[in-house]
Amino acid sequence: MILSNEAQKSVEEYLSTLRARLRGVKEQDAQDFVEELRSHIQDKISTAGEMTPSAVERVLTALGNPEELASEFKTNTLLTKTEGIKSPARVLSILLHWASFSVTGLFTLAGAIAGYFVGGVLFVCALLKPFHPHTAGLWAFRDETGDLNLSFRLGAASPPAAAHELLGWWIVPIGLLAALVLVLATSQLALWSARKFKRSNVLA
Amino acid sequence: MDSGERQQWSGGKWEVQLRKGCLELAILAVLWGGRLYGLEILKRLEDGSNLIISEGTVYPLLSRLKALGLVNSEWLESEGGHPRKYYVLTKSGKQRALELASIWTRFSSSMSKLLGPLSGGNK
């Protein structure tokens, strides 16, 4: 297939826009998708019989806007990744990918990190109680301004002098259970919003 | 006048969603006969139906079907000199096609029954 320079340039421009918009997609998948569309364009041009710039332009127009194609590709693979139960690491990697092209994704990522962090603190606190029975746990104390503070302490340092412990040994079952519930709820909520985003972007 | 226009517009949107919803089954059905590459799939969809809104949409959907394990793909050299990406149904893709087809058949026959009274009415 011999194209005029001008026609060749518009094909390359189309494909490089597409490639640029696929940032965040796994290198090999992105490459594969771009090559597939290149093959489509080559086939269409050679069956059209004429290789004038305007014929090439028609082929590209029929294919659709490269920005939209890239975002459809990203949201489609995002949706398949949210099906089924996922570990927090998996959820965070999906959200990281989502955050790379959407503000909603960025906020969801921040919320999920906060949820997992608090869940992690609860979990570690419950685990450390048997090793630091007098210092680990949930403590309440008043600071200099008289405000009541709640603090999860892992037992490395002594709690403030006037502090008193709230849960005692109950921190172990309550902490573990609360950590589990929080982590699962964070995952579900994050994946739910990713799916919702997906749906509104694919179908709207 | 104004409300008529709005009605038409929302009817168009409904139709687009309906087509998008059917596209997955249509692609699986087209692949039932054997291995095809993207443009062939596209041509069969265009010949057999008016499901295609924009040519490009079929490619992200094929990637999705692949990610779901419903199709496999491989690159093969063509006579034209450039490689083409061929798709073939997997075992679970065939299962999914049969499942969706039976849902479709049940759904469309009950829908036709429901719509029966409308067919004589309007004109």
Image (cartoon, coloured by chain):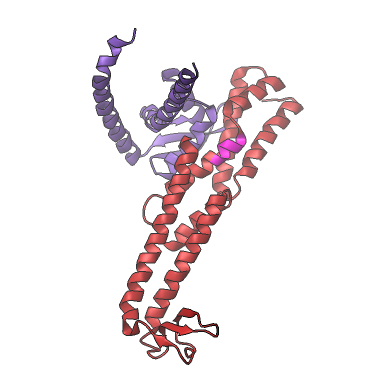
Chain colours: A red, B purple
Residue A149: give x, y in percent of width and height.
Answer: 47, 79
The quadrant of the rendering that contains the N terminus of chain A is top right
Eyeballing the image, is A72 above or below B80? below
- First to last magenta residue range: A66-71
Q: Is residue A70 magenta?
A: yes
Q: Is residue B74 visible?
A: no
Q: Is residue A6 visible?
A: yes
Q: Residue furthest top?
A: B123
Residue A179, quarter of the rendered image: bottom left
Per the picture, the main secondary structure of the magenta-coloured stretch is helix
Q: Is residue B104 magenta?
A: no
Residue A30: give x, y in percent of width and height.
Answer: 57, 44
Eyeballing the image, is A74 above or below B2? below
Pick the front one: B33 or A56: A56
- In the image, what residue occupies the spot 27% across and 32% down? B103
- In the image, what residue occupies the spot 29% across and 15% down? B118
Residue A157: give x, y in percent of width and height.
Answer: 49, 89
Query: Is B10 displayed left or right of A99 in the figure?
Result: left
Eyeballing the image, is A56 above or below A153? above
